[in-house]
Image: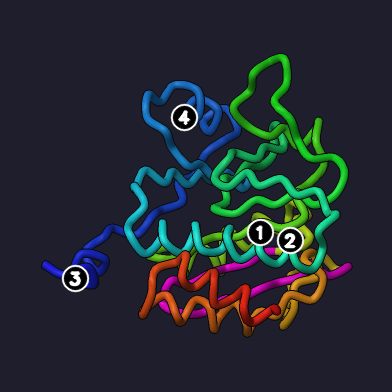
Amino acid sequence: MNASSQSSMLIPLRWQPASWDDYARQRDNSAERLRLYFNGQAVLVDMGSEGIDHASVSDLFLLLIYIWVKRMQPDLAVGSFGRCLLEKPGQKAASPDLVLYLGAGIPRRDDAKLRRVDLSQWRLPDLVGEIADTTLASDLDEKKRLYAALGIPEYWVIDVRGRVMAFRLQPDGQYCQCAESVALMGLSIDLLEQALARLAEMPNFAVANWFEQMLA
């Protein structure tokens, strides 16, 4: 069975009605490492492991972001916390594939040794993103609304099939699609799509080298 056939047989993730207490029990009592989302009324439990496409694209985008910052904003402090659980206690939670903190106020592990970022103690990340393999519909719907409600300034949806969609939070609390990153000061979304397209022909480190040459 080929990869596309396997993907088509995957069961879509479902949001289940839940309270914060329901979410917290799922978070604290599971023996497995889960990616959890809670929007105030429902919980999404992602128990799936990463496939080749998802893992390759996720690592590629960290490489691209590193190269961009190194060349364009070399003095900028950056913290990456991909897939770490972000919580607004009692209200909302998410575990995005990409989590970027830029500048001051980057979270550090605290004395309580919490395995998550408490957004009542730390500021919001500047950018989060989801790698969409089998989750594109939810990434562009429920998760998008969740990140807007949290107040995340910039949200990316990276479709492994070749699309990159970036959204900037507006004063009315809604996301508007943008052609350039604001958090990463003018990074072209079209250039990211070009890089993503090359992943069909070469490994992600080779794509990163191409991207760096494009910036030279």
- Please report the residue visible at 50 percent of the width from the left and 23 percent of the height from the top: 28
- Magenta stretch encompasses residue 166: yes
Measured in 3D between alpha carbons, the distance from the residue under mark 4 to the one under mark 3, in whole angstroms, is 31 Å
> Badge 3 local density, few (<14 within 10 Å), some, or many (20+)?
few
In the image, what residue type sits under mark 3? Ser
Q: Which amino acid does label 4 sit on?
A: Gln
- Disc nearer the start of the sequence (4/1): 4
Q: In this view, does 37 lie above or below 115?
A: below
Asked if the residues shown at circle 3 and circle 1 are in contact, with their CB atoms under 8 angstroms apart, the answer is no
Q: Give the residue pinned by disc 4.
A: 26
Image location of residue 204, percent across then percent down: 45, 66
Residue found farthest to the top:
111
Q: Helix or strand or loop: what does disc 2 sit on? A: helix
**Of marks 4 and 3, which one's residue comes earlier in the chain?**
3
State whether residue 173 is above or below residue 38: below
Q: Which of marks 4 and 3 is in front?
A: 3
Q: Can residue 126 be seen in this view?
A: yes
In percent of width and height, residue 46 lies at 41, 46
Q: Name the residue under label 2.
A: 70
Magenta span: helix, strand or loop, mainly?
Answer: strand
Which quadrant of the view contains residue 134?
Answer: bottom left
Residue 41 visible? The answer is no
Please identify, in this view, whether the residue under mark 3 or under mark 2 is nearer the observer. Answer: 2
- Residues marked 1 and 2 touching at CB (< 8 Å): yes
Residue under circle 1?
66
Q: Is mark 3 on a helix, strand or loop?
A: helix
Q: Give the range drawn in magenta.
A: 155-171
Query: Residue visible at 72% across and 15% down?
Result: 111
User: Who comes first in sequence, dot 2 or dot 4?
Assistant: 4
How would you rate the neighbour count of disc 2 (Cα within 10 Å): few for under 14, some for 14-19, many for 20 or more?
Answer: few
Q: Which of marks 2 and 4 is in front?
A: 2
